[in-house]
Amino acid sequence: MYKDAGYHFRNKDMKSTQMKKSSILFCIFLLCVSSAFAEKITIDSAVIQEYKGKLGRWLPIPSQTALAAATKETSLSLNEIYAINDVPARKNPVGGYLFIPYSQEAITSLAEKGITRPQIESADDEFLWPIDDVMSITSVLGLRGGKFHTGMDIPASRGTRVRSAMDGRVVFSGYAGGFGNFIQVEHRNNFVTRYAHNSINLVKKGDFVKKGQLLGFVGSTGNSTGNHLHFEVRCNDVPLDPLDFLPVNGNLKLLHTIKNWK
C-alpha cells in the first residue's frame, strides 16, 4: 500500500518535472526562432514619454498649484487629463504622479531645441534592459541563501527610470508583499516580465505598453535592503535567466557566461 502510494507521489512529481522541462524547452525554442533582424524603435527619455498613445511627461503633483502649472504645456482640460490617468471624478490627485500630455506646439518646440526621444536598434523579439547603463548585478537567477532566487537584482539609485522590456499588457500593478510595489507585464508567446521593489508604479492594470516605455521608478519597497530593481523573465510561469533574453551589455560580458541556476 505504502509502496503504491509512494509510486503515485513519485509519478506525480516526475510529471510535474517533465512539464516544467517541456515549458523551458518551449521557451528556448521561441528564443531560437526569434527574429534576427534589428529595427529602430523609439524609447522614453527623461523629458518625453509616451502613455496611451500620447507624448508627454509623468510629473509629481505635490499641490494644486503644481498641477495648474503643469497643464500650461497642454491644450487639454483638467477633466481630460484626469480621464487619461483614470483618476475618479472625486479623487484628489495631489500627492501622486500624473501623465501630462504635451500640446503639438510643445512637441514642436522641444524638437526645435533638439530634444527628442532616442532611437535604438532592437530585434522584434529581443528584450530590452529595463534600466539604462547597468554597471553591476548583485544577484542572478539561482540559489541564494538556500532559496531559489527567481530573477536578477539590478542596483540603481532611487528614482531611476524603469522601462518595459517588451511590448505587452500590464496584468498587475500594485503592492505585492515582499515584492513591494510590483508590476507584471504579459507579452506574446506566454512570456511575462516582472519589475519589483519600485518606489512608484506609474502604469495601471490593463494598460498596453510598448518596448522602452516608462513603467515606474526604482525603489526599495517590500523585502529589500537597498534601492534596486528585481527583474524577472518567465515563460509559462517558469522563471528563466534574464541574461538569456537581454542584449549583451559591454560592462557585463562575463555575467552572460554565469549560470547559477544549474
Image: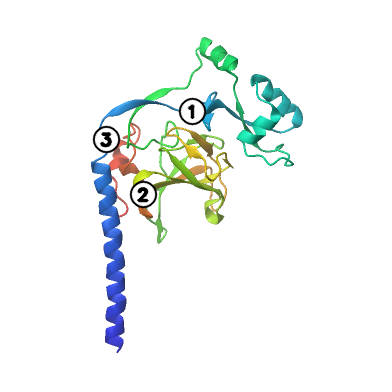
- Point 36% across, 54% down: residue: 236
Residue 70 picture location, percent across and down: 67, 24
Say what secondary structure mark 3 lies in. Answer: loop
Which numbered disc flags the more N-terminal residue, 3 or 1?
Answer: 3
Of residues 218 and 28, the one drawn nearer to the viewer in this rendering: 28
Crowd rating for badge 1 (residues with CA inside 10 Å; few <14, some 14–19, many 20+): many
Residue 111, numbered circle: none
**Residue type (three-letter) at the residue carrying disc 1:** Asp
What is the distance, in whole Å, between disc 3 and disc 1 at their CAs? 23 Å
Q: Is residue 98 among what the camera can see?
A: yes
Q: Is residue 81 left or right of residue 125?
A: right
Residue 190, numbered circle: 2
Q: Quadrant of residue 166?
A: top left
Q: Which residue is mark 3?
A: 35
What is the distance, in whole Å, between disc 2 and disc 1 at their CAs? 25 Å
Say what secondary structure mark 2 lies in. Answer: helix
- Point 72% across, 42% down: residue: 91
Asked if 172 appears above or below 254 in the picture, the reply is below
Residue 159 picture location, percent across and down: 56, 35
Q: Which residue is mark 1?
A: 44
